[in-house]
Amino acid sequence: ETGVTQSPTHLIKTRGQQVTLRCSSQSGHNTVSWYQQALGQGPQFIFQYYREEENGRGNFPPRFSGLQFPNYSSELNVNALELDDSALYLCASSLDPQGNTEAFFGQGTRLTVV
Amino acid sequence: QKEVEQDPGPLSVPEGAIVSLNCTYSNSAFQYFMWYRQYSRKGPELLMYTYSSGNKEDGRFTAQVDKSSKYISLFIRDSQPSDSATYLCAMVNQAGTALIFGKGTTLSVSS
């Protein structure tokens, strides 16, 4: 088990609603990245946060936004939910923004949009 | 063309078999190559990573990178039922800030 924890583990939302997912980093890790994993696919990079600022973003629309807090925990917010947003959302923490060779993932939050 | 290609399988083998998992990639600038294992309903777990070309061994697992062919492999010796999982290859993007994953190969080891 890694020290990365995510909450909630599951949730169901209705199309058009907004959702907030939370991630607590492994101790000593100051960088958090978020990934979306659709069923049968590999994780896709959403964005990375370092020192409370967005430090890189994948091909996701602006309705996907994030926050990082001084204690390095993080939130992923998704507005105007669409059915295709149904996926496993993973957060990964690392020692620094370039530390992806030893990024540790949480267990994920499974989001279902109906 | 996707940056990272991985055959999703499924792959079924008997206990004790040698398993070979592979990925190809298109960007010759990739330098770091990882293999993750993901059990059902869990997050990916890092198995090992390799820098540039060459081999790396860790117990029953061996990772190989051939940069000239843009081809990476993971070999599992003496496979066990507990190895049944999805195996994801991943590479660090050029900016160094993200992982680019393959689709994952689902492996089933029967006893």
Image (cartoon, coloured by chain):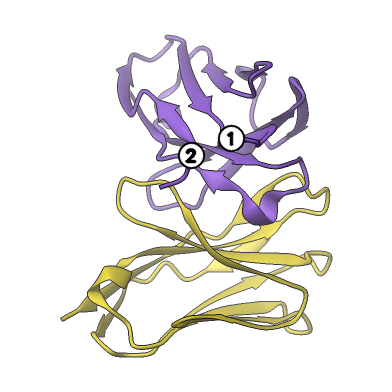
Chain colours: A purple, B yellow
Q: In this view, does B29 lie to the left or right of B82?
A: right
State yes or no: discs 1 and 2 in contact (Cβ < 8 Å): yes
Q: Quadrant of residue A62?
A: top right
* Inter-mark Cα distance, 1 to 2: 7 Å
The local secondary structure at tag 2 comes to loop
Residue on which disc 2 sits: A3
Q: What residue type is labelled 1?
A: Ser
Name the residue rendered at 66%, 79% in the picture.
B71
Query: Which numbered disc flags the more N-terminal residue, 1 or 2?
Result: 2
Q: How crowded is mark 1: few (under 14 residues within 10 Å), some or many (20 or more)?
A: few
Figure check: A47 above or below B51: above
Q: Where is residue A109 in the image (x, y as percent from the top left)?
A: 39, 31
Q: Position of residue A86 (x, y in %)?
A: 39, 31
Decide which of B95, B103 is in the foreground and name it: B95
Q: Position of residue B5 (x, y in %)?
A: 58, 66
Q: Residues within 10 Å of mark 2 (few under 14, many from 20)?
A: some
Q: In which quarter of the image is residue A66?
A: top right
Name the residue rendered at 33%, 56% in the picture.
B39
Whether labels 1 and 2 belong to a single chain: the reply is yes
Quadrant for the C terminus of chain A, please.
top left
Chain that bears disc 1: A
Q: Position of residue B51 (x, y in %)?
A: 75, 71
Residue on which disc 1 sits: A27
